[in-house]
Image (tube, grey):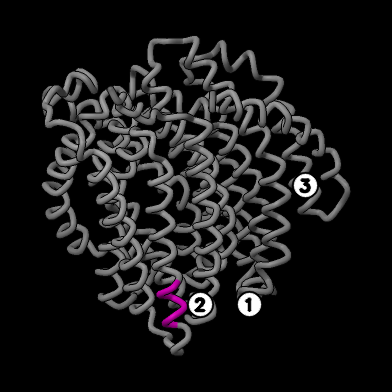
Amino acid sequence: MVTAPTPRRPSSGRDAGWLAGADLIAVVLAFFGQILLANALLAQHYGWMVLAIDLYATLFLIIDLGLPTLLARDGAKAPEMVRPALWRIYRWQLALALPFLLLAFLLKPDRLLNMAPPSELLVLAALVGLAHIASYAPRSGLRVLGEARLEAVSKLIERTVTVLGYALLYSTGSTSVVGYTAVFLLGATSGWIVALMLLLQRTSSYPPSSAWSRLDACWVSPRALMWSALPFAITLGILPYVIRIEKFMVAASGGSELAAVFHVAQLAWLAGLVVPAALRSALLPVLGESRGNELVKHREMNASLDMCFALLPYGLFGGYIIVSVFAPLAFPATYFDGTYGASAVDIFTLLLLGWGCTLLATPTYTSLMAGKNPWRFTQFIVIVLILALFFGWSMVLNGPQRPAEQLMAAALASSLSAAAMLLVSWLLSEDMAFVKARRDDWALALMCSLFIVIGLMTQTAWWLLGLPLFLFTKQGLTAVRSTLQ
């Protein structure tokens, strides 16, 4: 008698490796794509494209409804319910998408950012946002099935199609911002379709089922489902503004050219955020499945934190080297010589401190997502948004008026917001014993990160005081091995 193969299960270490590896490759491709855009488009048109895509990506996230996150949290308990959950999610999202899309175009939110791009650009940017939202549910489904490797494939296909399209337009001498945005839409749609097809193929062997309680009690009734997903919907609707709020404020006060410079500085910083995002995505299903088992939960959180400590120095030094050496060779000199204000390299270096804080917040941040009270996670994000608004309002909108000082103030505000996120994740954590047990490690990591950023910013030897961070490398590797067992 032949025994059926054991289904793959989520693994925080293995899945984080697949997702982080794919995201880093995608980042390299995206960086090349941004180089093509920056060289093909005028700074004003480049700013239009960046702001329009970011604007609609954040505006439409409410359509997500928080349901893919709920699936990522609960799906590992009942793999046979992943496909029915996917169609259920799409029905709810479609019901909200059409009226919300109409409302967005009636309100013309682009006027708030002091820009007047072509209407075709706005339509394409809106469709990009919708395609990305549609891809979240099948990618979450693949992850809870233990197939983060296939989720990674869909992301790489999306990015490859986009960059090849950019290269084709660039080779023909095209300077059309609408054309490049259409290519971006083609890539986003490709990634969504691939993820959907892979999920349907992986779930084809499961018999039809309607046992929603196997996922969680909240999936049994529509009202309970929406109430449980609402905290994630609110949170996901707010979170992108926390990340992009300084860019929006720079655009509103200084114009699209300054926003383009800040965007170039943010590129590698945003690329670096894929590392904590991958760790978080891989950790969420594991913590969701082990909810109620404190031993397993703390073991996984400790392993995740050890990986964060180990990755921190490589991200800080590696990111600085890549941006300071290669970015000026790839992008137009105007983004680095002060034509529009500060150098993008200086802005990025200051943003590195915020990246480090975001990375170190991964275990407690994810624990709040997977906790028994999801409204606590919403409370966390609302507090962070309020603090980010305060920092941005006081330091960017009501701060210095010179472009260089304005851009650096925006970078500092971003890093302070990330530091606040780390602090609030500790204070609201349901695992204060875990926080107190690792506080010395956190303190050392933060102090070393500060020395590294100060040294790199001032071109002095202060960065040498950050070298003890490399002592975490060994326990980080041990943590990876422990999650694979």
Mark 1 Cα within 10 Å, few/some/many (few <14, many 20+)? some
Q: Residue at position x 82%, y 38% from top? A: 467
Q: Amino acid at mark 1?
A: Thr
Residue shown at 77%/44% (left/top)? 452
Mark 3, residues whose alpha carbon is within 10 Å: few (<14), some, or many (≥20)? some
Q: Which residues are magenta?
A: 164-169
Q: Residue 348 location in percent, x, y?
A: 64, 56
Mark 1 → mark 3, Cα distance in angstroms: 25 Å
For disc 2, the marked residue is 43
The image shows residue 130 at horizontal and vertical percentages of: 26, 56
Whichever of callouts 3 and 2 sits on the residue coming sooner in the sequence is: 2
- The local secondary structure at tag 3 comes to helix
Q: Which residue is mark 1?
A: 334
Label annotation for residue 362: none
Work out whether 115 lies above or below 93: below
| SS majority, magenta | helix
Q: Residue reaching furthest bottom?
A: 173
Residue 78's x, y, as percent? 26, 24
CA separation, marks 1 and 2?
Answer: 9 Å
* Secondary structure under the numbered disc 2 in the rendered image: helix
The numbered disc on residue 454 is: 3
The local crowd at label 2, few if under 14, some if 14 to 19, many if 20 or more residues have their Cα within 10 Å, is many
Residue 429 shown left or right of residue 447 in the figure: left
Q: Amino acid at mark 2?
A: Ala
Q: Residue at x 64, y 76 (%)?
A: 339
